[in-house]
Image (tube, rainbow, N blue to C red):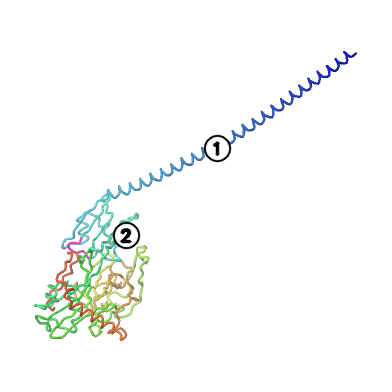
Amino acid sequence: MKIKGWRMVLDHVARSQQTLALIQIIFGLIALAGLYWFSGASSQAGTSQSGQSSISQVSISQQRSQEQMDGAEQAHQARSHASEEASKEEKLRDLQYMVEPGDTLEAIFRKSQFPITELYEILEADEPYLALDVLRPGDRLSFRIDPSNKLYALSLVVDPSKTVSYLRGEDGRYVYDETLTPTAWITEVVRGEVSGSFFVSASNSGLSENMVMTIHQLLKNTLNFRRDLRAGDQFQVVIEREVIDGIAIGHDRLLAARINARRKEFGAYLHGDGSYYDADGSSLIPALLRYPTQKRFRISSPFNPRRLHPVTGRYAPHNGVDFAMPVGSPVISTGNGRVTRVANHRYAGKYIAIDEFGPYSARYLRLSKILVTKGQLVERGQVIALSGNTGRSTGPHLHYELHIKGKPVNPMTADIPVLQSIPAADIASFRMHVQSMQTLMLDESQIAKRFEHPASGSPQATDPAQKENL
């Protein structure tokens, strides 16, 4: 009985141990399954992150590669453009030409075998400036020619300080351009003694023909140069000369002049208003006229630095005022001066240029008949031409230009001398200015004997009859 009971106990224990082992196995399997699942999830996450990182790296690499390609392409394009420009410049060749006596622009073009149609295109671009209308022996022209032997650009050295160019644009038309070299003005004094004529004596002292003629024009109403001057009479002149690196370039400006004749003094002094006065402040030249006609005519086209041209349809400066008037109407000089140009331009028509005294000059275009000659002295109000309809014009009119110090201004509004004497409020300062000029004239350290002038800037010849009268 006891033995049977123990067997039952032992059987129960054995079954319990088997159950426990089974439970342990089950828990072990569950643990292994959990570990496997966790390991798999971690591996999947790692794989996902690795894939994303790899994709990101590929994207960045591709972007950098594209940027490098773009940069290389831009650099290649820049090098190609620079190479094309350099190649273009290398292919252009220059032809230099020095103007000879009797040369005209048309003759030069024919001699150089350039089409006359190219000349007409250039003259059209030059119409507002007329820079090519005054060719002088010794002037230098430069033609730039492209590989097809077609004219690409024309340049003219006007003087050492200024070069004008006409460049062919993409549309085949030429465009005006100018290059200016910085200059300086220096004050100098010229002294001399009359021996023979005043013209010869002053020229021998270093004054240009233009300067001598200016002095004569200013003082002729108070001094008879042929009758009143005697050998030994003294003169002093204060001038400003425009220079580049100390070399005169042919542009002079009269500041003061004084002649002692028969124990009497005759003087001319430049005032701030651009006009000349004697030592007492009385004007030596008449005031400028505002209108270049005896009658008032309607203004058909005003001064406009940027006008739409009625014929060409292009924007170009209109450097003057147009007066509508019948062909043959009298045209008068607006001031005393000297005729510097008489010409017939393909587009500007027949025209006259006059240097008035001081900083003023004038142009008269579209004329039908010219009544003066180059080098002639004219008076304010003198009839110099008859109006017309010449050149490229839409109807009969006079084109009138006023220039101050070489720059075109509106003649209807410009500040021009209109007074016959200096106002009382300014007379004291003017007399101080006269005194300073006279002191300068007597300063031996300021005396200049001779000056160098370039050939291209030499003054124009004066009528021998006018020289004799000096």
The percent position of residue 93, horizontal first and vertical second, equals 25, 51
What quarter of the picture does the N terminus occupy? Answer: top right
Residue positioned 13% across, 83% down in the render = 261
> Can residue 406 be seen at all in this image of the molecule?
yes
Q: Nearer the viewer, residue 142 or 14?
A: 14
> Mark 1 highlights which residue?
53
Q: Nearer the viewer, residue 122 or 324?
A: 122
Residue at disc 1, secondary structure: helix
**Which residue is at the front of the view, 367 or 54?**
54
Q: Is residue 383 left or right of residue 44?
A: left
Residue drawn at (35%, 46%), measured in percent from left and top? 79
Residue on which the image places disc 2:
175
Quarter of the image with the C terminus is bottom left
Residue 258 versus residue 356: which sits nearer the camera? 258
Q: How many marks?
A: 2
Residue that sits furthest to the front in the current view: 2
Q: Which residues are magenta?
A: 134-139
- Identified by mark 2, the residue type is Val
Image disc number at residue 401: none
Inter-mark Cα distance, 1 to 2: 62 Å
